[in-house]
Image (cartoon, coloured by chain):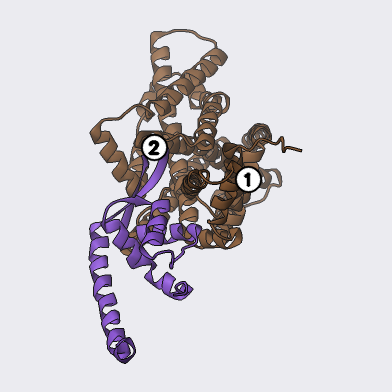
Amino acid sequence: MENLTHFSIDKELKSLRQRFSKSGAFTYDNIDELESHIRDGYELHKEEHSEKEAYQLSMESLGDPAELTELYYKSNQQSIWRNYFWIISLSTFFGLLVYRITDFMFQVVFTAIDKLGISVEYDYMDYGFGLAAGIVFVLLSLSFRKRASRIFHSLTHRLLRRPSFALLGVFVIGSMFNNNIGPSFLMENLSSEIQAFARSAQGIYAMFMYLAPLILLFIYFWKYKHKEYKSFEEKLSARLGLCALLGVSMTIFVILSSMILAEGVMGLVILLDLNVSIYTQFAIPMVLFVLFWLSLIFLLYQQPQQVLGRLSQIISENTMTFLSVGLSLLVATFLLADFTGTLFFEQMPNEHIGEFFYLRDLWLEKIFTFFLLLLTTIWTFRRSKNRRMIAWN
Amino acid sequence: MDKISKDLTAASSIPVILGILSKGESYGYEIIQEVKLLSSDKITWTDGMLYPVLHKLEKKGLISSQWKAGENGRRRKYYQITKVGKKAQEQEIQQWKLINGMLNKLWKPHLT
């Protein structure tokens, strides 16, 4: 009886790509290249064999899968880990930059509203602004898809080849928009009620949580699943989309985890009426925070393929579950932070609140980002010393 | 003649790749076909093993790569030799000439 199963090279290659991807030993670029190679062999063998046989012959010529995986694993061990490190570092900076710019825009808008004497319901302003900022943010990200000018192309290309300079630039720009340097003069002229509201991050959270991540997540998966890069700009756009997406997640994660740790520990100290200085109280969550990051970096450094390969497998195979669980966790974390924060601020003497914010912003934002910047700079110099190219793959 | 041994194949892979690319840009599958043709099928590389070698050379800056659409519109990753690669190739030529000369002297009685 004739075999009714129709052979499809595209279907076979899709499945093969997933298997390569799951192994964690291959970069996306490697998988593209191997697919191209298999198609070349397939086209050649098809002249003398059936489609299925041609595919099998082409696959056999690649060699033993276990040996191949091992070879690619060794070849990519460093670059895969580094790529993820760059993405995580850039993402954190990108997220903080977005946070600061949005904060700046937020305050400018509220200054204007206050000066014009317009009365608007806070809730509507809050979510309206968040939505508008989200749309602007997504449009800006999408604008990178358009063909950029030669200068932009050259600059971004250079920056991508020198991540430490890119990070430094983002760090400097981000600092310029910092509350303490930039828009603080605006705040002084506002009424106390507006000040209190403007300082809240509701609008930013609304933007992060409702619009931007979903659209960027869609762009990210669409780009990576279909691998439709046709130009440098498109690749850059996908990278920025990925950085922005991770940046948003990382920013929320950094801010919320610092809030939970700092406010939780300090709230506990107040509740138990322990006689400990505010600096010591702050040292405990800081140590926990740094330990967490060091453990994460150590884990990734030791077993990048196993950890990241498994992670990418889970995400690619269970996109919807990942999305729903991720968002639920995000909301739960947000609510938890809100709860511990309320508990903490109710108990904390007013004179310590300003100091707390100063310490939290200083340590958890500036020093953490500076720490990442330092690490990436050292690695960049080490690499240039070894005359190795930065592989974004 | 039997097929070339694995060790010798591995040792000659870099000068062979640089030599092929010095004639013009090429992609993985084409490089393998070229090797088969040049060696009259005496040297057979396992296809998948070629790419890590190419990536290693790229990391060293001896070759560069670029994705391009071929004649049939399908994208392939093309490799080109760089200036550093050309210098490395010159060194390889000198070294292989030396080995070749040395072996010729040693084997002269057997060759005549």
- Residue position marked by numbered label 2 in the rendering: A236
Viewer-side residue, B42 vs B45: B42
Q: Which mark is residue A261?
A: none
Identify the element where label 1 is drawn. helix
Q: Residues within 10 Å of mark 2 (few under 14, many from 20)?
A: some
* Left-right relation of A284 to A354: right
In this view, B88 is above or below A214: below
Q: Amino acid at mark 1?
A: Gln
Specify the colour of chain A.
brown
Q: Which mark is residue A313?
A: 1
**Quarter of the figure with residue A348:** top right
* Left-right relation of A201 to A6: left
Viewer-side residue, A92 vs B72: B72
In this view, A24 is above or below A355: below
Point out residue A220 in the picture as x, y percentages from the top left corner: 51, 34
Point out residue B107 in the picture as x, y percentages from the top left corner: 32, 88
- Discs 2 and 1 share one subunit: yes
Residue A114 appears in the picture as rendered: yes
* Left-right relation of A74 to A321: left
Q: Residue at x 28, y 71 (%)?
A: B92
Identify the element where label 2 is drawn. helix
Point out residue A21 in the picture as x, y percentages from the top left corner: 58, 48
Specify the colour of chain B.
purple
Chain assignment, label 1: A
In this view, A77 is above or below B95: above
Callout count? 2
Q: Amino acid at mark 2?
A: Leu
Chain assignment, label 2: A
